[in-house]
Image (tube, helix red, strand yellow):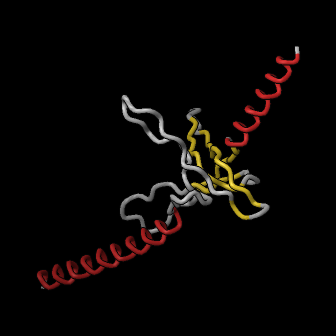
């Protein structure tokens, strides 16, 4: 009788683990689809400087697309400060009018529920480069006139 109970318990445990693995796979596929990062320059594409080799020249950023008419994209920094003062930053293409970025943290192995997306501050940095270039040009013109 004890052997029959043990066999029954083993079968229940195996069925439970099989259902758990199926649910974890389903959650992983759904979460991965939401957290997918495009690479074509559209909104959400990473636009950071690529890591360079020791003796190689720095490669340029991935350019952001122009975007829809009236809704231009810019390369910007999404930032979050941790409680210990550490600053996390991701450079990504977003709408020039955007002020927030939705970050999807890594999903733990075997998770049965999706991680809650985090909202990070976003600010364009490519516009700052254009502004700095314009200011430098204005200063140079003023210097030439003096």
Q: Nearer the viewer, residue 138 or 17?
A: 138
Instruction: Return the residue nearer the eye: 49 or 98.
Output: 49
- Residue drawn at x 53%, y 41% is 60
Q: Which residue is at the front of the view, 12 or 6? A: 12
Q: Residue furthest right?
A: 146
Instruction: Name which residue lies at 78% across and 33% down.
Output: 134
Q: Residue at x 62, y 43 (%)?
A: 79
Q: From this viewpoint, which residue is outermost toward the front?
A: 145
Residue at image x 61%, y 43%?
80
Position above or below: 111 against 88: below
Q: Which of the 4 quarters of the picture holds residue 123?
A: top right
- Based on the displayed image, in which of its 4 quarters is residue 66 positioned? bottom right
Q: Is residue 4 above or below residue 97?
A: below
* Image x and y of residue 144, in percent: 83, 18
* Quadrant placement of the N terminus: bottom left
Position of 6 relative to 69 (above/below) = below
The image shows a total of numbered marks equal to 0
Q: Quadrant of residue 72?
A: bottom right
> Residue 122 at x, y = what percent?
68, 47
Q: Is residue 53 left or right of residue 89?
A: left
Q: Position of residue 91 (x, y in %)?
A: 58, 45
Q: Quadrant of the C terminus?
A: top right
The percent coordinates of residue 137 (x first, y second) are 78, 28
Observer-nearest residue: 97 or 58?
58
Q: Relative to residue 37, is residue 7 drawn left or right? A: left
């Amino acid at each position: 009788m004890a052997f029959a109970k043990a066999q029954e318990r083993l079968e229940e445990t195996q069925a439970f683990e099989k259902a758990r693995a199926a649910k974890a796979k389903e959650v992983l596929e759904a979460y991965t689809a939401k957290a997918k990062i495009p690479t074509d320059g559209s909104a959400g594409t990473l636009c950071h400087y690529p890591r360079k080799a020791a003796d190689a020249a720095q490669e340029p950023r991935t350019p952001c697309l122009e975007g829809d008419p009236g809704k231009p994209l810019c390369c910007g920094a999404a930032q979050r400060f941790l409680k210990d003062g550490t600053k996390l930053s991701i450079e990504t293409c977003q709408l020039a009018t955007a002020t927030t970025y939705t970050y999807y943290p890594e999903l733990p192995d075997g998770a049965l529920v999706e991680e809650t997306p985090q909202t990070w501050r976003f600010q364009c940095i490519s516009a700052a480069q254009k502004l700095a270039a314009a200011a430098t040009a204005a200063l140079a013109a003023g210097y030439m006139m003096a």
